Amino acid sequence: MYTRKNQRNLTAAERRSFVGAILELKRRGRYEDFVQTHTEFYVPDAENGLRAAHMTPSFFPWHRRFLLEFEGALREIDPKVTVPYWDWTVDRTPAAALWSEDFLGGTGRSSDQQVMTGPFAYSAGYWTISGNVTDDRFLTRDLGRPRDPIVLPTKAELASALNESVYDVAPWDSTPAKGFRNRLEGWTTGGGRQPWLNHNRVHRWVGGEMLGAASPNDPVFWLHHAFVDLLWDRWQQKHPKATYLPKRRLPEDDRQSGRVISLEETMPPWDVRPSALLDHKSLYRYEV
């Protein structure tokens, strides 16, 4: 068993090791495989077919397995490396440590949102974007969206999701106002000038590559989803009698039949069931 740490508690050596492993994965041509997987399984409500990764109950177990696959690839390169998490209710500004030049680098320049600092800047020569919806070859960010400011989720907004006592509710997509999964994934509106909630708003606050299905092109994706994974664990502890829903395959007359993965159905591309990913404690722990 290994430990995932809060990124703010990483030593300088741990930062270097994490960044180095990611860059080596990129050099070996394997990083794009993860971007492609996320892009392939990002299926919105409006599209036909199975929804495995987003706008669906399997959002949490699918990303847990996705993180484990990525972390395993990093640990093949450096067994000491684990994926740190970013608590965005605490480290809430572009001045936070994770955006420093020796870690993830900072925001993009105003003209084209190109990241100019840190190891993932195009100018550094190690990070070229190849799997994206645009032709840009460089990493982009727009932290806080200065032209139309957006703020990261607050502890109170996060608590509103953690206080939900039911895991998910019909129609099992982006529309329910209730249920932990959608309140945390954040497709419902935050109201006022702060659209979206929790997980989704973080993607929008970072901007750039994080706005689309190819969001793993920005390495901050992994720190963000490690925290989302931790939050699922916190919710389980807060509601020990609650469970993954739906428990059984939806009937054929349900309009979501064949589009939603129940507890014992398998999630592509790994042929693994959500029930196998409800607990991580035999594999890793979180330092809090």
Image: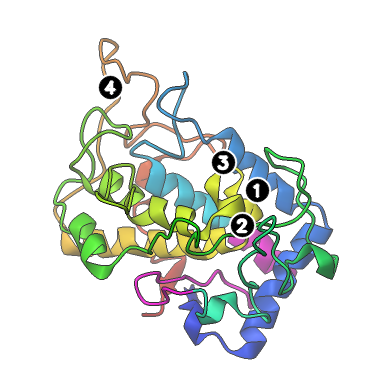
Q: How far apart are marks 3 and 4 (CA)?
A: 27 Å
Q: What stretch is highlighted in magenta?
A: 70-93
Kind of residue sitting beneath label 1: Phe
Q: How far apart are marks 4 and 2 (CA)?
A: 31 Å
Q: Which residue corresponds to mark 3?
A: 213
Q: Where is residue 250 in the image (x, y as percent from the top left)?
A: 28, 22
Does label 2 or label 1 sit earlier along the sequence? 1
Kind of residue sitting beneath label 2: Phe
Does label 3 or label 1 sit earlier along the sequence? 1
Give the mark toward the camera: 2 or 1.
Answer: 1
Q: What element carries label 2?
A: helix
Q: Can residue 265 be seen in this view?
A: yes
Q: Which residue corresponds to mark 1?
A: 34
Q: What element carries label 4?
A: loop
Which residue lies at the image location 60% right of the left edge and 62% below the top edge?
71
Q: Which residue corresponds to mark 4?
A: 250
Q: Is mark 3 on a helix, strand or loop?
A: loop
In contact (CB < 8 Å): disc 2 and disc 1: yes
Magenta-span inclusion, residue 87: yes
